Image (tube, coloured by chain):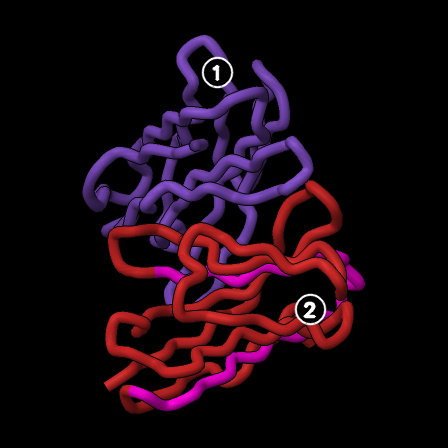
Chain colours: A purple, B red
Amino acid sequence: GDSVTQMEGPVTLSEEAFLTINCTYTATGYPSLFWYVQYPGEGLQLLLKATKADDKGSNKGFEATYRKETTSFHLEKGSVQVSDSAVYFCALSDRGGNNRLAFGKGNQVVVIP
Amino acid sequence: DADVTQTPRNRITKTGKRIMLECSQTKGHDRMYWYRQDPGLGLRLIYYSFDVKDINKGEISDGYSVSRQAQAKFSLSLESAIPNQTALYFCATSVGVNEQFFGPGTRLTVL
């Protein structure tokens, strides 16, 4: 079935550093791709999305490009802030009508001042 | 006021007890979902509903049941709670195949 793989382990970096979180997917057809963010003690919020190949989603300085040839949707931000500390989940949605989200395991990002 | 609310926010119960988690939404969305989140495992889908008369099992439905009492309400029940159902539970809503909106979560502990 459809699945999402995120890079292993938490990510710790200094303020203003460049952030990359890798995400690859396996799917039949052409899924929609999402990044969700979970701040401490809160539910998930949609950060950005892309619905077709070569689309770039962007929000709050974060970007991710839907790469069909490498089945990837890596998240990037050029200069992180302490307030970006959160757990980030990559997800895909089956566009066959079920809209079932398949999530990666998430990456804890800790930004140190 | 939050668009997707969950009650209770925290619950501690004992093995064998029946538990109901409730979700309400004011977004007018047709689709509702229940997920559980476990450390290191991401979110996994328990049940989902496309409308009041349509209920579907997700990937981990064993031990759970649901009720869609109205378009705005979707409840998750654990008929006989067991310790490995200790987790964070999220309700979500969507309009058709668009993005999902999540509630704040219910932290359930089964002793």
Residue A61 seen in the figure: no
Residue A59 seen in the figure: yes
A41 left or right, relative to B73 = left
Q: Quadrant of residue B64?
A: bottom left
Residue B99 percent coordinates (x, y): 64, 45
Query: Foreground: B7 or B60?
Result: B60
Q: Which residue is mark 1?
A: A67
SS under mark 1? loop
What residue is at 48 percent from the left and 40 percent from the top? A35
SS under mark 2? loop
Q: Which residue is mark 2?
A: B3
Determine the chain carrying the residue at label 2.
Answer: B
Q: CA distance from mark 1 to mark 2?
A: 33 Å
What stretch of residues is rendered in magenta? B16-37
Amino acid type at mark 1: Arg
Q: Is residue A1 above or below residue B26?
A: above
Residue B57 percent coordinates (x, y): 53, 55
